[in-house]
Amino acid sequence: MEDYLKSFVEETSRYNDIVLGSLLPDNWWVPLSHFYRGWLRNYIAGTLLYLISGILWCFYIYHLKRNVYVPKDAIPSRKAMLLQIGVAMKAMPWYCALPTVSEYMIEHGWTKCFARISDVGWVAYIGYLIAYLVIVEFGIYWMHRELHDIKPLYKYLHATHHIYNKQNTLSPFAGLAFHPVDGILQAVPHVIALFLVPIHFSTHIGLLFLEAIWTANIHDCIHAKLWPVMGAGYHTIHHTTYRHNYGHYTIWMDWMFGTLRDPVEDEAKKI
């Protein structure tokens, strides 16, 4: 068992070497313990992913495709986007505690994670991944919904994110502009799922970091019309009504629990 757990430590150490070894002098990170190296690597990787994906996406939709996807009067101001970046950057050190803690638990054998797909086979891997995603979708839906329904949670946590409630204030940078406790709570289902279903370690870490790209996507106000994906068209409605479309990746949970509101139907009613 100890030899198997070492494979997780070796993998995270390899990630540390790639990220920290490429970007920082050795004397900045080598003296740190393995846990704090992991946090620093997650912080740097998370920050770069958020900023680079946000800048590229904004450049594409607001400049290269100006007036194609977003009307000129609906493009958020530079001030609004900088405010969102500021909120996200203040929260980023706390966000990165979650993957760091999940890595610690995995490395100590507290979860159902497995190191290699060959340990279970491709069929089982896909089945476990589907189960993991269903648990995450269910968990994020209800966590998000309760952050609205429980008034103190909304007032002191989630309201920070909902100051962006119109198309000309929403941007890809709003995707991580949360109170840090709010952002962590909405990502906690990823960690809870580790104890409920076997999941490939690298896949788990990859999905956690995919959140930075996914949340940027669903805040760009562009309805991709890709059923059953809970894209930006649905999420923009959430930011304007506060009572619909709490789901994360898909519309299924909102459909099951009666909170789905379709952007196409909404547009048809306005005509």
Image (spheres, rainbow, N blue to C red):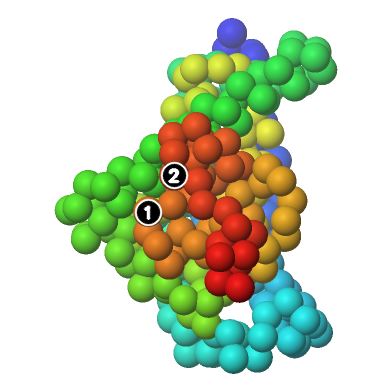
Q: Is residue 240 above or below residue 203?
A: below
Determine the residue located farthest toward the top in the rendered image: 1
Q: Quadrant of the N terminus?
A: top right
Query: Looking at the picture, how far across and down is residue 191, in whole percent?
Result: 47, 32
Query: Looking at the picture, how far across and down is residue 203, in whole percent?
Result: 68, 34
Name which residue type carries label 2: Thr
Regarding residue 187, the answer to whether it shows in the image is: no
Q: CA distance from mark 1 to mark 2?
A: 7 Å
Name which residue type carries label 1: Arg
Residue located beneath label 2 in the image: 259
Of residues 59 and 61, which is closer to you in this image? Answer: 61
Q: Is residue 15 above or below residue 116?
A: below
Query: Looking at the picture, how far across and down is residue 219, in whole percent?
Result: 57, 65
Q: Quadrant of the C terminus?
A: bottom right
Residue located beneath label 1 in the image: 243
Query: Looking at the picture, how far across and down is residue 65, in whole percent?
Result: 79, 82
Q: Earlier in the sequence, mark 1 or mark 2?
A: 1
